[in-house]
Amino acid sequence: MEILGYDIYPVEESFLSRTAVKQVQIEEILKSSDFISLNCNLTSSNYHMIGKKEFQQMKERVYVINTSRGPLIDQEALISALKEGKIAGAALDVFENEPLPMDSPLRSINTCILGAHNSSNTLDAIMRVNELAISNLLKGLQ
């Protein structure tokens, strides 16, 4: 298995060798990946970085995952790709318009998993954050 990565900026060789990530152009990721995961911030240059053209370039039956920013994907193009079976599925916990409207077609597509962008918001995580905050306060007061 090869892990491909794309960034508009060159990534340090030490990181690439340490992680075994191969930095390539986005076109190579689109045409050869079984899973495409978006993990970046939203800027004016990457708004809708995945749209109709990119879905057409993707390997058949790819899964698309977006856990970063909703507008990275053109949601209408995603809906079309899912309905047409161009992609195998999508997992999203961010949406182009949030909250996701109740009448969004994404809610009825069974090859699309929807999340709430708060997976770390569990009781255990909240307790750890609270305990850490109190511990840091006490250390600061000493």
Image (tube, helix red, strand yellow):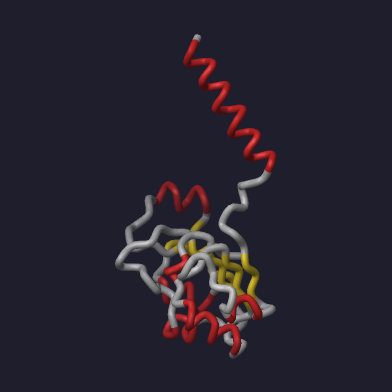
Residue in the picture at 48% in, 12% down: 141
Q: From the viewer's perspective, is 131 left or right of 75? A: right
**Percent coordinates x, y for residue 35 in the rendering:** 58, 70
Residue at the bottom extreme of this rendering: 84
Residue in the picture at 46% in, 62% down: 69
Picture quarter containing residue 41?
Answer: bottom left
Picture quarter containing residue 131?
Answer: top right
Nearest the camera: 137 or 6? 137
**Percent coordinates x, y for residue 14 in the rendering:** 42, 47
Q: From the viewer's perspective, is 48 left or right of 108? A: left
Nearest the camera: 87 or 7? 87
Nearest the camera: 105 or 83? 105
Picture quarter containing residue 106?
Answer: bottom right
Residue at the top extreme of this rendering: 142
**Percent coordinates x, y for residue 135 in the rendering:** 57, 21
Placement of the N terminus among the 4 image quadrants = bottom right
Nearest the camera: 37 or 97? 97
